[in-house]
Image (cartoon, rainbow, N blue to C red):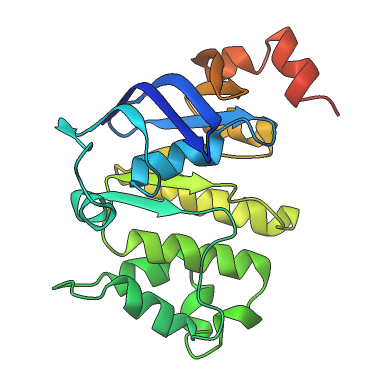
Amino acid sequence: MLTITNLSLNYDGIPALHNVSLQVGDQEIVTLLGGNGAGKSSTLRAISGLVRYSGKIIYDGQDLTTVAPHRRIALGIAHVPEGRGIISDLTVAENLRLATWGASHCHYDEIYSLFPRLPERHKQLAGTLSGGEQQMLAIARALLRKPKLLLLDEPSMGLSPKLMIEVFAALQKIHAEGVAILLVEQNARLALTFAERAYILENGRIALAGKAALLKNDVKVKELYLAG
């Protein structure tokens, strides 16, 4: 589904990623872990075409080097950014309609069955939703184009344990329907339980990679990311 080779980028001359290489298999869940500033969000932004980079990103057999961000969406890549990116002063319904602008068919029924809180609040301003409901809206908006690859940046941030369970249960259903997921997540224990494989970034480089279940028991991973 996705192959990244020697991905490098910088911001105003300051390196953020150094020759990062990773893969996401068809219908696979992969998590990308690391401390603040490790380059996790930058990796997702590069895949979406939101930043300039060097190296190669091959998605579904196609080199994305010259593909514009909006075309990447059309190819089946959906990105839920850190902070959710919803438009606070529009309603839930308006946020969803914007996501489907120009689409010939929208899958509102499927989305509403996945997140039943959203139809209950379709006339409510998005900025007045709870943190969990805003995250559901952000994910729902990304799913309306029926993506094959879902990029998630910190979906559990700011959520109560109950809402976190609801959101990840919905993500499990999304995956069961054949969507591949690349997950950036601050809760390393949750991410390593949810994912099949994991990469750990340190200072913009891949420091560790392997099956999530094995990394969960790695001494260094336990010390740096799973303490407490």
Q: Residue at x 43, y 33 (%)?
A: 29
43 left or right of 157 in image = left
Of residues 192 and 56, which is closer to you in this image? Answer: 56
Q: Position of residue 60 (x, y in %)?
A: 19, 34
Of residues 155 and 43, which is closer to you in this image? Answer: 43
215 left or right of 197 in image = right
Q: Is residue 127 visible?
A: yes
In the rendered view, would you say 112 is above or below 79? below
Q: Residue furthest front?
A: 13
Q: Is residue 176 visible?
A: no
Q: Residue at x 51, y 31 (%)?
A: 31
5 left or right of 221 in image = left
Of residues 159 and 205, which is closer to you in this image? Answer: 205
Of residues 67 and 115, which is closer to you in this image? Answer: 67
Residue 44: quarter of image: top left
Q: Position of residue 71 (x, y in %)?
A: 20, 54
Q: Residue furthest bottom?
A: 123
In the rendered view, would you say 47 is above or below 227? below
In the rendered view, would you say 140 is above or below 194? below
Quadrant where the N terminus sits is: top left
Q: Residue furthest right?
A: 228
Q: Residue at x 77, y 20 (%)?
A: 224
Marks counted in the figure total 0
Q: Residue at x 39, y 40 (%)?
A: 46
Q: Position of residue 26 (x, y in %)?
A: 27, 30
Q: Position of residue 176 (x, y in %)?
A: 36, 43
Quadrant where the C terminus sits is: top right
